Amino acid sequence: MTPLSRIELLQQMPVFGAIRTDILEFLLARTRMVEVPPGGFYFHQGDPGDAMYVLESGHVEVLKRGADGTPRVLSRLGPGDCFGEMALIDLAARSASVRAGDGCVAIEITAANLMSVYEHDIEQFALIQMNMGREVSRRLREVDEQLFQLLVCSDQARTVESDRR
């Protein structure tokens, strides 16, 4: 993919919405491309987190280990999706693992890359941070709704079981 195509990819993402082209060029000049073969991992649950990734090609699975240690697929992501941004916000360990379903290429954006943007243009840095917060909030709302629906179904199942008795 050409640098112009990468800028266009980033401009289509909520995290980089309204970020000026010159800032995206500045940021991309400091990033690296990470290729992961099929079945390989970008990172594992519990790893320290210091980067987010923007998937340029391929598909990944986001996995989380259950109480029994068995990994479960939380979501599947494709080109243009990002993952790992939570670690850049809360500086905590990775909450899930990300495995390549097929050969993948992603743009790695580190905390140091974002610090360079901060030093170069604090307003654009603030906008990126605000966008990241919005994206995490959007995902939290989706999970909240899924959890609510699961609880409603569970309550309905208990009511049906109770009525049978």
Image (cartoon, rainbow, N blue to C red):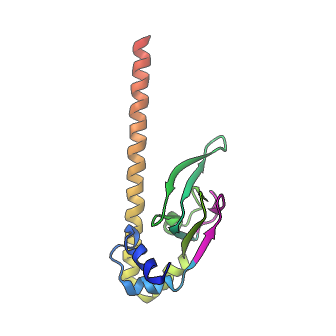
As rendered, which of 160 and 8 lies closer to the eye?
A: 8
Quadrant assignment, res 122: bottom left
Note whether 121 is above or below 35 in the view shown: below
Residue 18 as seen in the image, left or right of residue 34: left
Quadrant assignment, res 145: top left
Q: In the image, residue 156 lies at what x, y percent?
A: 39, 26
Q: In the image, residue 155 lies at what x, y percent?
A: 41, 28
Residue bounds of the magenta highlight: 33-49
* Residue drawn at point x = 40 percent, y = 62 percent: 135
Residue farthest along the top direction in this orientation = 165
User: Count of labels shown?
Assistant: 0
Q: In the image, residue 93 lies at what x, y percent?
A: 60, 61
Note whether 74 is above or below 11 in the view shown: above
Q: In the image, residue 62 lies at what x, y percent?
A: 55, 55
Residue 73 as seen in the image, left or right of residue 147: right
Can residue 118 be seen here? The reply is no
Can residue 61 be seen here? The reply is yes
Quadrant assignment, res 106: bottom right
* Residue drawn at point x = 54 percent, y = 63 percent: 58
As rendered, which of 16 and 81 lies closer to the eye?
A: 81
Residue farthest along the left direction in this orientation = 18
Note whether 71 is above or below 41 in the view shown: above
Quarter holding the C terminus? top left
Residue 27 as seen in the image, left or right of residue 98: left
Asked if residue 52 lies in the magenta stretch, the reply is no
